[in-house]
Image (cartoon, rainbow, N blue to C red):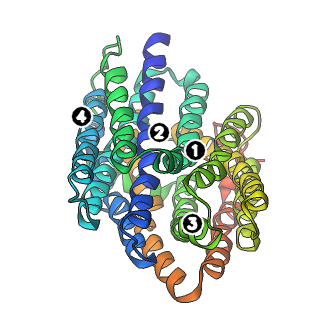
Amino acid sequence: MRSAFRRFWIGQTASQLGEHSCLVILPLIAVISLDVGGAQLGALRAAGQVPVLLVSLLAGAGMDRWRARTVLVTTDLIRAAALIAVAVAALTGTLGLPMLAVAAFTVGTMSVFFDVAYHVYLVRLLPRDRLPGGTSAVEGSRSAAQIGGPALGGTLVSLLSPPVAVLSGAVFFTLSALAIGGIPWREPAPPPTARGRIRDGIRFVARNPVLRTVALASAAFQFFLAGLMTAYLTFLTRELHLDGTAVGLSLAAAGPGALLGSLLAARFGYGVVLVTAAAAGDGVMLFLPVVHGPPAVTVPLLMTINFLFGTFGQLVNVTATVVRQSVTPAGLQGRVAATITFAGLGPAPLGSVLGGLSADHHGLRLTLLGTAAGMLLSPILMARSPLGRWTDVRGQDT
């Protein structure tokens, strides 16, 4: 069992690095090589995010009936193929924004299935008493990749040619497929009660006040974060005049922060930690619009902001995931995870588009300020709900 979990963790980490580095590699190639504007960049990012709206609920219904490992390996291989196609187009001089958008959509679609599948696989792989520790490890990797992956992507675009930078993502996905495909453990069949009806997952989340709050708070956070990140990538390159290496270094500080947050999540409680960490992590982003000066000044400031954001963001991610797993029956794990993903990440494409339009019409700094302030809606929603009083995985209130 330990060997199986270790291979799963390695594969999941590699896949997350590939996914989240590509979230920056593809947009940076569009900005640097194709010279796109804020609105076009927002549309490209939205192409990679809209699959959450289109397929996440279907993925959740299917995952409660399918073998999760098959889905994990298949989605890895399809994403690798999509990135190889982009690299070939770049080498032959035929790469354009439509090609990048198709690749982003394909990677985004397969990532939705992968993310739902790995949550389900983890629950099937580990006994319930080991889930908090396993979840902390896996979510630590995911959060580190979610914030550190863009740093890696920025560095690769700066140091390598665009085709090679894109191929690095394909390498990550291939490594993931090999690691997960070689797990020496036979996955049990899904529970016979898992009929795969989408409405069951939606109804369960809607009727559970804790899960309902997780979904709403995630939606608020992801909407404004998507807008912030669209403006942020442009802000770093065009307002602060940072090259790819400096961009990568600035964002990379979130990786150690995520690791620290993962360690802290295993030591502290739930409700108060969620609210406090979300407020601190989102609040620190309010300092982004006032950053200015030469790289020797701005890069350390950005690294500090991203480190704190990574630390508190990871604390929120792990804690919210453990809460979700603890209150969800085994036969509903896939559909509940997909429902929360749908509700939480669904607004992100609109946030990306509006963030790009706002950056073009109202300026980068004002857009950063507005979106960072909007992210604070997430801890407010949690504080005003039963989730803010959650004390342990059994849901006992204070």
Residue 319 against residue 251 in the figure, above or below: above
Amino acid type indicated by mark 1: Gly
Precedes in sequence: disc 4 or disc 1: 4
Q: CA distance from mark 2 to mark 3?
A: 22 Å
Viewer-proximal residue, 150 or 313? 150
Q: CA distance from mark 3 to mark 1?
A: 18 Å
Q: CA distance from mark 3 to mark 4?
A: 36 Å
Precedes in sequence: disc 3 or disc 1: 1
Tell me residue 80's x, y (percent): 28, 39
The reply to whether discs 1 and 2 touch (Cβ–Cβ < 8 Å) is: yes
Q: Secondary structure at mark 4?
A: helix
Which residue position is annotated with label 3? 237
- Give the farthest residue toward the bottom: 361
Which residue position is annotated with label 4? 74
Which residue position is annotated with label 2? 17
Amino acid type indicated by mark 3: Thr
Which residue position is annotated with label 1? 148
The reply to whether discs 4 and 1 touch (Cβ–Cβ < 8 Å) is: no
Q: Residue at x 64, y 37 (%)?
A: 393
